[in-house]
Image: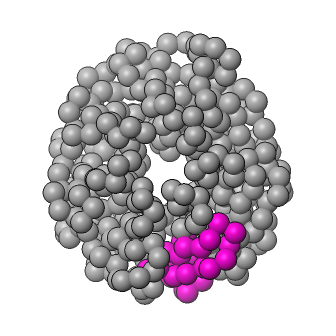
Amino acid sequence: MHRQLRAVHFVALAALLAGCQEARFPVAPGPAGPHFDGVGGGLSGRIAFESFRDGNGEIYVMNPDGSGQTNLSNNAASEDDPVWSPDGTRIAFVSLRDGNFEIYVMNADGSAPTNLTNNAAFDFAPAWSPDGTRIAFESFRDGNDEIYVMNADGSGQTNLSNNAAVDDDPVWSPDGTRITFLSTRDGATEIYVVNADGTGVATRLTNDVMSEGKPAWSPDGRQIAFVRFRSTSDEATDIYVMNPDGSGQTNLTNNAYQNFLTPPVWSPDGTRITFVSGNRELFVMNADGTGAIQLTTNGRVGAEETHIAWSPDGKRIAFESFRDRDENIFVVKADAEAETTQLTTNAFDDIEPAWTLRR
């Protein structure tokens, strides 16, 4: 299901390049052996993720040092895309237990799983509002991908995008008043913004012959990072930022090698941004594009690092990697030491790490 949803999200975008070029950023020292200070690695919160160790996709949770791995969903159907509520008490996820993709929510201990969408069409990609009272999501109930929003109990389901084109990838503004999304309504895949309460009309933020993707609001709401393809014939991309009204679009990476479609992710304090480049390695740079350093060196061509999740204190980054020829979850220090620890080690895929937002 993970692959199915990934395909849906990228339907309007070109596939990633199979090749790579040599990275030209400074490289942090090679990974050290597993080591954390203190109980639970000295880190707070928990990491939710999807695992295929039980023969199907299940939602698991673990401590930041990899201990306490627990199956929360425990269902014969596939579950996908875990997303923590802002207060860390609930997890929204996508489930096939009713025969089609539905959005569920459960308590952080796995209790009380509840179908929120309860619709015959596909519903997926849940995104909590910053105050935890609403959930944006994608739905195919109108015959095409649309952006919907609902209350956290599943009531009040409302179509926000309401267009015949593909509309997907909803992302809340930090103040909860707006939602950015991707749309093909004007040809290329572009970034739009709409009021979260359904008033007004969607506004186009990018207007480029190249496709854009993966918008990410800065924690203070003053900027939006995003991915832009460089040309119609070259699938390499760059990381840009812009103001919330679409002005001030600035190329942060601006380099001759490949950056990949893994979304740019802001650090909790908004001072840094992660991205994937070169041999699909994890990098971090300052929010203005300076000071980029390579955090991972996986040593295998195509061993992509993806699904980036910062720790609440901004000191470490969880990610998914294919470096062992199956996908596992790792944590790396977000500084020049780049100490890396593998958290999951089973022979089946462990993917989509999501760190609780609370410390």
- As displayed, is residue 114 above or below residue 312? below
- Viewer-side residue, 289 vs 247: 247
252 left or right, relative to 293? left
Residue at position x 45%, y 80% in the image: 198
* Residue 156 in view: yes
Residue at position x 75%, y 56% in the image: 106
Instruction: Provide the residue span drawn in magenta.
Output: 137-161
Where's residue 167, x and y in %? 43, 75
- Viewer-side residue, 298 vs 224: 224
**Is 143 within the magenta?**
yes
Q: Quadrant of the C terminus?
A: top right
- As displayed, is residue 170 above or below residue 220? below
* Residue 236 in view: no
Residue at position x 59%, y 58% in the image: 132
106 left or right, relative to 229? right
Q: Residue 325's image quarter?
A: top right
